[in-house]
Amino acid sequence: RLFAATRKAKLEVELVLVDDFSGAGTEETKAVVQELRKEGYAIDVQVRMPEQGKGLSSAVVHGLRLAKFPVLLCMDADLQHEPESVPDVAGPVLRGEADFAVGSRNVQGGTAEDFPLHRRIISWIATALALPLTPCRDPMSGFFALRKDTFEEGLPRLNPMGYKIGLELMVRCRCQRVKDVPITFRDREAGESKLTMKQNLYYLAHLGHLYWFKHAPLVLLVVFLCLAMGSAVLFAHAILQKLLQRAYPCCYRCYRCYLRLGRGAGRRRAAAARMPGKCSDVKRPNYRLTAKQDLHVATGSPFDRTSPVAHKIGDSGREEKQVNVSAFSFEKKVAKPSTVSFLRKNAGTGGLSPVEARAKVKARMSRESTDDDLLVSKPKKVNAFSKRSNPPNTEFRRFYERADLPVNVDQNGSVPKIAWKVPIERLDFHHYLPLFFDGLRETELPYSFLAEKGVEELISFGGPKILPVIPQLIIPIKMALNTRDPKVMVRVIRVLRALVVADIDQEGGGMIGQALVPYYRQILPVFNIFKSKNTNIGDAIDYSQQKSDNIGDLINQTLELFEIHGGEDAFINIKYLVPTYQSVVH
């Protein structure tokens, strides 16, 4: 029904199903998808394992990130949303009339079949609570469409909770033009409702987060007004108590007795018996003001002394007094000798005549002053090939130290290996691949070993999962190359060579090399500096060539792979940033 409706509207679509792993149910879903793909339908299923996340909202965000077309549409898979309404809901976004389109039950032409009364009441209340956040008439709907660039712009701000992901996207992505499209909301043909009291509480917490995000000053004003009103009530209560105490002390004492006796009816009657006229038996408290006693800091005695002197206690616990400096003489000052003035070997003047001694001392002092000048004025030697700062603050190190990475070092054999706690096929490459690339600039074990081997195996088994993650890999690659550490650079260049050819054996492959072309400006400037860095050793043997550790040769081979697999625009972009590069294709 979905593909028939979109073909009739002349729309090219791709259907992405996001399914949380459920054992036999997941395998059955995969089998149905395989049959549909054999019939020519563009459909894919993404299975999430429990460790990769749970819940509807995170599943929707995961599916939207994987979609490849510029317009994204979300709908339920239980046929509550009619597939024939997809062209109508996506139409305003496709035509540029709206930033966000919602399939709505609450506009003219929209209906909800077999919707019980209590569900309608809950929906009305939830919609009313969300009115200050969005102009949408049905923000509870899970049938919506938006542009992918709008979604990616708001992706860093998303914090989905519960099931109302449409409201989250409208507010966090700052969608100004929202269009309600009338639809018919059917009764579900499979599954059951997940609306529970827990989800209602999640929705209220979600509203609180969204109100703080969009109307933070208003929320602060309301909180301030509530605090101000509470403070005013407490202040008025205190003033009234003071007035009552001064004007009618007997009534005030009875009032205090009433508060102390409690809330019970019997206690109230007991308090009433102590009303005015019968207050003689109430013991009046004796409030007498006494002056603060002045205690001596040393003895703790409060008695007066003959000549009070202001003392203060020092760090040692004893009283400190000012020192009388008249007992000291400041006429003669003795400077502490430094090590420079001490005699060194062969620096003495013993056995020399006065003229020779003076000449020797003068020459020594002149030589020492010249050495000091040279020491101060000598600049630090820095060139283009010097190592740059590489602090150990990578995200890879942080995640590994708190045991959030599914890897460890296997020391069972003679050569250490990397051991995966989870099969690589089940990993979320959008999350883990950038982390491992960030660890490529590590220089300490085991971080450098795990990062390098982990990237190699992720690239080997990644397949089509690598291409969508390319934009997230550029910053870690750039930071690693900018360290200008030869060991780090060799590691990164090897990874780049493997990355370019990772998908050439697959159907429709060869796209990773083309996807890297727009990012040459971030990667190739360091290549241009080190391209000709080959040590001239004459007829000696350079073992780094056998081990593929020679940076100049690695850079030339990598540039050739970039040109071969980067498409028709690769050479001109390489030539612009590395002028000395010679084409191997043209």
Image (cartoon, helix red, strand yellow):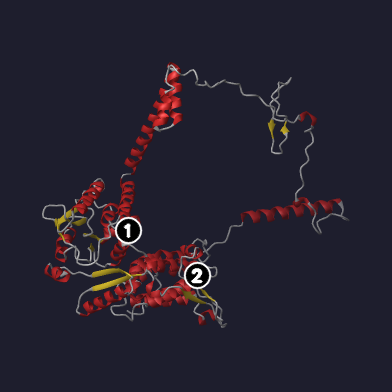
Vertical placement of 498 versus 276: above or below? below
Q: Mark 1 points at which residue?
A: 155
The three-letter code of the residue at mark 1 reads Leu
Residue 67: in sight, yes or no? yes
SS for callout 1: helix
Q: Are marks 2 and 1 in contact (CB under 8 Å)?
A: no
Of 384 and 133, the residue lying toward us: 133
SS for callout 2: helix
| Image location (x, y in percent) of residue 13 | 20, 69
The three-letter code of the residue at mark 2 reads Val
| Image location (x, y in percent) of residue 270 | 43, 27
Of the numbered discs 2 and 1, the one sitting upstream in the chain is: 1
Q: Mark 2 points at which residue?
A: 488
Q: In which quarter of the image is the C terminus?
A: bottom left
Classed neighbour count for the residue bearing mark 2: other residues with Cα under 10 Å, few (<14), some (14–19), many (≥20): some
| Image location (x, y in percent) of residue 558 | 41, 75
| Image location (x, y in percent) of residue 359 | 80, 53
